[in-house]
Amino acid sequence: MIPSRLTAALIGGLAVFAAAQPATAASAQEQRAQKTAQIPQCSRNLGTIAVVEPESNWWTQNQLGSPTSVIKVFVNRSRCFTLLDRGKGMAAAKAERELASGGDLRPGSNLGKGQVKAADYVLVPDLVASNNDSSGNNIGAALGGLVGNRNVGALIGGINIKRKTADVVLTVTDVRSSEQLAMTEGHASKTDLGWGAGAGVFWGAFGGVGATGYNNTEIGQVITLAYLQAYTDLVAQLGGLPANASEANVQQAVSMQKPGRLFAAPDGKTAVRPLEVGMLLYPTGNKQGVMWEVEDELGNKGWVSSNLFGLAR
């Protein structure tokens, strides 16, 4: 009789616990709104950004999709950057451009070179460490077997003591200078999910963007929360970015395409040195007509006609 009494007590305790939840827990809509509000929003656009995959595809070990889909949701909702596609969308765009260059598209399609926006920054989501099952037993599975009711076991599974944790890192790199402008870490564990996490609260946003497993698995949800923490800190760090990343960076180098001379002033009267074809020059940004102020690789500064050089590739 002891096992039956224990079973009855467990079921009774679970019934009381489950009955108490509607009175204390927020509704799914309220929890979704709370989680969505945690994504920070910027007062101004910080530039263009591309989210790219890290070198190691760690997500496949947990049967998850690429984390880039999760980060793109954050970027889109924060309105901090103009999001550029450097994945499947870019591959499809290249296919269209190949059709255009081959003469297969209709006239007036307006598709060709010089239209693709440049990324000011690259954002890489990586995983420092993850623990799928670091310790403990599944209380839900144990009680489910004891009670003999699969539905009860699934219900209790929301409070099992397996420690699912994730430590992630987000890195932002300036495309022009290759400087790492920010690196933030995020941590989350299963205890951060709460009782109602398994009901799809907040996670539905990731189901339709290719973020496989991040809305319907516990480890996926834990990783998402860790990335949310890291992205929140990231936005706080990037508040000092320039209004125009292109103008704030050093000008692109140019190379001499015709022989010429470097002059001390834009009037072209006093020569500093001869310039040979192929020499690299670095514009300072100062211009007078066709004359550009530049520096050579030896540190000599002067002026040269822009008719003699082209952008270095």
Image (cartoon, rainbow, N blue to C red):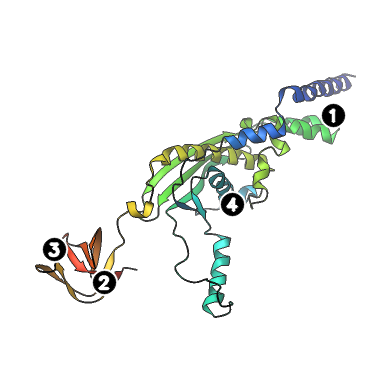
Q: Position of residue 46 (x, y in %)?
A: 44, 47
Q: Which residue is tagged 4?
A: 66
Instruction: Measure the C-alpha gap from mark 3 to mark 1.
Output: 91 Å
Determine whether, in the image, residue 53 is placed left or right of residue 31: left
Q: Nearer the observer, disc 3 or disc 1?
A: 3
Do callouts 2 and 3 mark residues in contact (Cβ within 8 Å)? no
Q: Earlier in the sequence, mark 4 or mark 2?
A: 4
Q: Nearer the viewer, mark 1 or mark 4?
A: 4
Q: Which residue is tagged 1? A: 147
Could you tell me how far apart the alpha carbons at marks 4 and 2 are, in whole angstroms? 43 Å
Q: Secondary structure at mark 2?
A: strand
Labels 4 & 3 near each other (Cβ < 8 A)? no
Label 1 neighbour load within 10 Å: few <14, some 14-19, many 20+: some
Q: Secondary structure at mark 4?
A: loop
> Could you say which is closer to the camera, residue 88 or residue 134?
88
Residue under label 3, please give it. Answer: 265
Residue 309's disc number: 2
Residue type pointed to by label 4: Ser
Rendering coords of residue 110 (x, y %): 52, 71
Q: Which is more foreground, mark 4 or mark 3?
A: 3
- How far apart, in angstroms, are the residues tagged by discs 1 and 4? 39 Å
**Observer-nearest of 25 and 7:** 25
Residue sitting at the far bottom: 103
From where the camera sits, is residue 163 visible? no
Instruction: Locate the N terminus by quadrant.
Output: top right
At 66% across and 41% down in the image, what residue appears? 203
Q: Quadrant of residue 16?
A: top right
